[in-house]
């Protein structure tokens, strides 16, 4: 997908007056019609494939240790806090205040940023269904499946919440978000990842912990299911479940595909089987 919009998207993220929903509406013009979600046959995966429920997992359990780990420039933050402390204690020796502020931030800031990571939940999607690496990483070494969603059929409240990841060699500095505590900026770091992951072409939904009252962190995407892609090894490892999937979605007139290996190269391809 063409990412010429990325510069504008960065500006939207940094606009403290623009909510995620408002940004989601703007990004609708760039959002792919279809997105995909690689899954394995576990409880979360089966709720997804049989019930259309997309689970939003804890951000601190993602496979990339840098993912959602908020970075703040310590030197800039220390200077900011030192200015505040000086205003609170104008009569105290400035050298002592500087040393105390620096020591306190060194000890507490990273601890706070790790805590912030635990306060959000994420559901991850991608622009393609034929990545050998993602089949290996996220679909139980090709034994799982890949959900296909038509975003035009997803309720707007969910669709606007699905935003793209920006890949960069430099970590996103969340200094403005941490200092201002602006709710429109606080989740920005969660849309940046290392360039190493660029092949994933990821889009994601991010929500704060505690936003639901029943503790069930699922988004209902059942109306948008437009296809099921079954992994290379799923027929051997999950025969009964695969047969149930084919029957269920054939009745709904939704395509079910089997992933096959291209004979002359290292590509995978989906072939409809129902």
Image (spheres, helix red, strand yellow):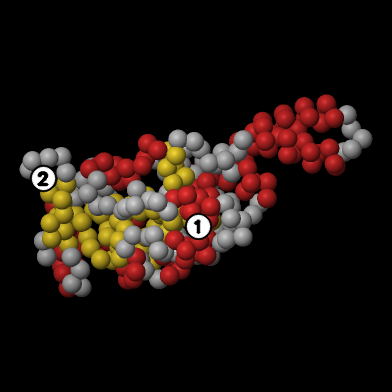
Q: Secondary structure at mark 2?
A: loop
Residue to which mark 1 is pinned: 207
Q: Residue at x 52, y 46 (%)?
A: 189
Q: Which mark is residue 119?
A: none
Give percent across and percent down for residue 76: 67, 35
Q: Residue at x 85, y 41 (%)?
A: 87
Q: Judge the density around disc 2: few (<14), some (14-19), many (≥20) Cα neighbours within 10 Å.
A: few
Q: Quadrant of residue 256?
A: bottom left
Residue 33 shows up from this direction: yes
Closer to the camera in the image, 8 or 166:
8
> Looking at the picture, does residue 223 appear above or below residue 272?
below
Give percent across and percent down for residue 66: 47, 38
Depth check, mark 2 against mark 1: the one in front is 2
Q: Is residue 151 left or right of residue 142?
A: right
Image quarter in which the C terminus is found? bottom left
Give percent across and percent down for residue 186: 58, 51
Q: Is residue 156 left or right of residue 106?
A: left
Q: Residue at x 73, y 35 (%)?
A: 79
Residue to which mark 2 is pinned: 262
Residue 121 shows up from this direction: no
């Amino acid at each position: 997908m063409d990412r010429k919009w990325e510069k504008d998207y960065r500006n939207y993220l940094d606009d403290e007056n623009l909510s995620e929903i408002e940004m989601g509406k703007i990004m609708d013009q760039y959002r792919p019609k279809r997105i995909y979600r690689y899954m394995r046959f576990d409880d979360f995966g089966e709720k997804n494939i049989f019930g259309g429920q997309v689970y939003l997992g804890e951000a601190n359990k993602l496979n990339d240790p840098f993912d959602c780990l908020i970075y703040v420039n310590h030197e800039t933050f220390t200077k900011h806090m030192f200015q505040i402390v000086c205003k609170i204690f104008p009569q105290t020796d400035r050298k002592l205040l500087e040393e105390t502020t620096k020591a306190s931030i060194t000890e507490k800031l990273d601890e706070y940023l790790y805590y912030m990571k635990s306060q959000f939940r994420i559901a991850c999607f991608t622009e393609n269904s034929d990545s050998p690496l993602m089949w290996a990483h996220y679909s139980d070494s090709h034994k799982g499946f890949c959900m296909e969603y038509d975003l035009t059929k997803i309720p707007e409240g969910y669709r606007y919440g699905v935003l793209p990841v920006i890949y960069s060699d430099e970590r996103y500095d969340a200094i403005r978000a941490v200092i201002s505590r602006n709710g429109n900026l606080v989740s920005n770091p969660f849309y940046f990842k290392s360039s190493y992951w660029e092949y994933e072409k990821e889009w994601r939904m991010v929500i704060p912990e505690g936003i639901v009252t029943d503790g069930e962190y699922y988004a209902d995407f059942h109306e948008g299911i437009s296809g099921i892609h079954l992994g290379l090894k799923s027929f051997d490892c999950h025969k009964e479940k695969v047969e149930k999937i084919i029957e269920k979605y054939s009745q709904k007139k939704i395509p079910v595909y089997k992933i096959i290996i291209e004979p002359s190269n290292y590509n995978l391809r989906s072939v409809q089987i129902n």
